[in-house]
Amino acid sequence: MVREAVLLLYLIINSLTDIRKRQICMPCVICMAVSGVFRVIMEIFGNRFEWQLFLPLLIGTVMLILSIWTKSAIGMGDALLLLALGLWMSMEELLIVMLLGTAGSGIYGALLLAVCRRKKEDTIPFVPFLLGGYVGGLLLWR
């Protein structure tokens, strides 16, 4: 319950920052990552270590590489946020959040193109859709 509240708080703060300024709150992402590292350390010392603990970090790492490769078509902040989320979530949870968030942003982008006559080069904030994916995931997990 505490983990869900902490992640929800981090995602809400970053969603608001992403909507307002089109950037990620880096101090918040750093706090999220550092606290996630402590969570992983506690898991390891609590004799609950499993190699699957590090699988979600692959998603964030791949997104970081894609951000660099595509010259920030995928935001660097979004990739760093996913990397920090990987310290907090299981692989299944993170994949569900990303799937729901990507689907939501795709539908929203399509509506903007069709209804509002926006250009496909226009950017939209991604973190609010991750927040929606997280909330949707919470409803699926419970």
Image (cartoon, grey):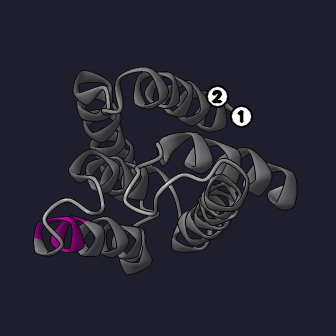
Give the side of residue 81 with respect to residue 96, left or right. Answer: left
Whether residue 46 is visible to the viewer of this picture, yes or no, is no
- Name which residue lies at 65% across and 37% down: 4
Give above or below for 79 relative to 38. below
Q: CB under 8 Å between callouts 2 and 1? A: yes
Disc 1 crowd, CA 10 A, few/some/many (<14, 14-19, 20+): few
Predominant SS along the magenta part = helix
Q: Quarter of the image holding residue 137?
A: bottom right
Amino acid type indicated by mark 1: Met
Q: Is label 1 in a helix, a strand or a loop? A: loop
Specify the quadrant that holds the N terminus.
top right
Mark linked to residue 5:
2
Q: Is label 2 in a helix, a strand or a loop? A: helix
Q: How many labels does the image show?
A: 2
- Name which residue lies at 20% across and 65% down: 67
* Residue 112 image offset from top left, x and y in percent: 64, 52
Query: Magenta stretch: residue 67 in it?
Result: yes
Q: Name the residue under label 1.
A: 1
Give above or below for 16 relative to 93. above
Amino acid type indicated by mark 2: Ala
Disc 2 crowd, CA 10 A, few/some/many (<14, 14-19, 20+): few
* Residue 123 image offset from top left, x and y in percent: 40, 49
In this view, the residue in front, 26 or 74, is 74
Q: Closer to us: mark 2 or mark 1?
A: 2
Give the side of residue 136 with respect to residue 29, left or right. Answer: right
Give above or below for 138 relative to 71. above
Residue range in magenta is 64-68
- Name which residue lies at 22% across and 74% down: 66
In this view, the residue in front, 137 or 55, is 137
Give the side of residue 127 with respect to residue 34, left or right. Answer: right
